[in-house]
Image: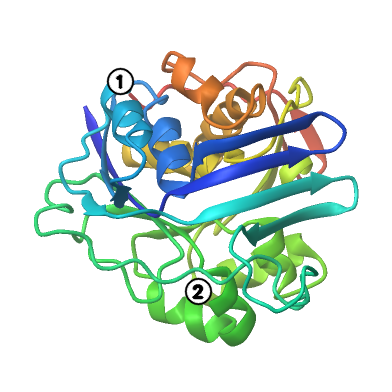
Amino acid sequence: MTLVGIHAGLSVDHLVSEPAGARFSCPGGPALFAALGARLVTGTDVRVSCPLPEDDPRFAQIFDESGVDRRHCRQVPTVPRLWILNSARGRRIVTQDTTAGTELERDGHRPEPATDPLPSPAAGFTDGLDGLVVSSPAEPPAAGPRTRVGLDPHQSLVAEQGLRYLRRVVSATTVLLPSRVQLNLLDRDPRRAARSLAAGLRLPVIARLDAEGCYVVTADGTWSVRDRAVTVVETTGAGDASAAAAVAALAAGADPVEAALYGTSIARIALADWGHAALAAAAPLCRPFPEITTRKENQIHVRRTRTPL
């Protein structure tokens, strides 16, 4: 078995998706989606470190029913409440708490609300981990020298500090897992930004480009990974689930392109229903979905993958 740790936050979400409709007070947050995504790579055990709210027992129940080890979570009174708004004009995340004196959201320079850095995980959390997924770290994650660390950058710190922030939080075992929004903070062309990060940090990058799939950059070249068979019901959590599945595959021995195929497969599952529902109901995958394609140097082919498990 491969042991993957998830260090991230939780939230309770009001999901509004144009024109599909809305769902209210849904369990959410990177820790939930990442934990459910990582467990869908066959042979993966998942351990989670996150604030666990006393006022909402659903999170503990979901982790327990999914076989996720939550012994390193810390109890907190509550977790953030968010509006997650999706339309053809873009995605917006705002807190349900009013912080200004008006009803209008005026903080337009931030693509999402600022994320408070999580406290360090409890003692023993990183012991024995083969892989570690860290969401929005402000400081370098604590991990063993052989632990494969998947790092989803802190969006506000990318905007404020750029490469200086990323140099501070990566290590030799890091794979960067930036989103399109994060990459666009560095360059209008997200693929060019991903290539610049890989070259500047000398690390592999698995960029998550929404409907355009994943873009993988390594010392051996660049690949686009696409799933043209996906059906999208609602998008919340798909990126977190995809990133964690990629780390689980890497920790089990996959190369970055194979890992992106697993991540793209898990994203398809996440997109098939609202919130965490499809991820919680799915069975682990022994191999990526066969319809997913890769492209390198303008040569499109269906990649034959070995399972790393």
Can residue 162 be seen here? yes
Cα separation between marks 2 and 1 = 39 Å
Seen in the picture, residue 109 relative to 223 is either above or below; the reply is: below
- Residue 35, position in %: x, y? 38, 37
From the viewer's perspective, is residue 264 above or below residue 296? Answer: above
| Mark number displayed over residue 65 | 1
Q: Is residue 8 left or right of residue 123?
A: right
* Pointer 2 or 1: first along the chain: 1
Residue 208 visible in the snapshot: no
Query: Looking at the picture, does residue 224 appear above or below residue 279?
Result: below
Q: Which quadrant of the figure has residue 111?
A: bottom right
**Residue 173 percent coordinates (x, y):** 34, 60
Q: Position of residue 254 (x, y in %)?
A: 41, 36
Q: Quadrant of the N terminus?
A: top left
Number of other residues with Cα within 10 Å of mark 1, as a class: few under 14, some 14 to 19, many 20 or more: few
Residue 300 drawn above or below residue 193: above
On screen, residue 180 versus residue 124, left or right, reads right
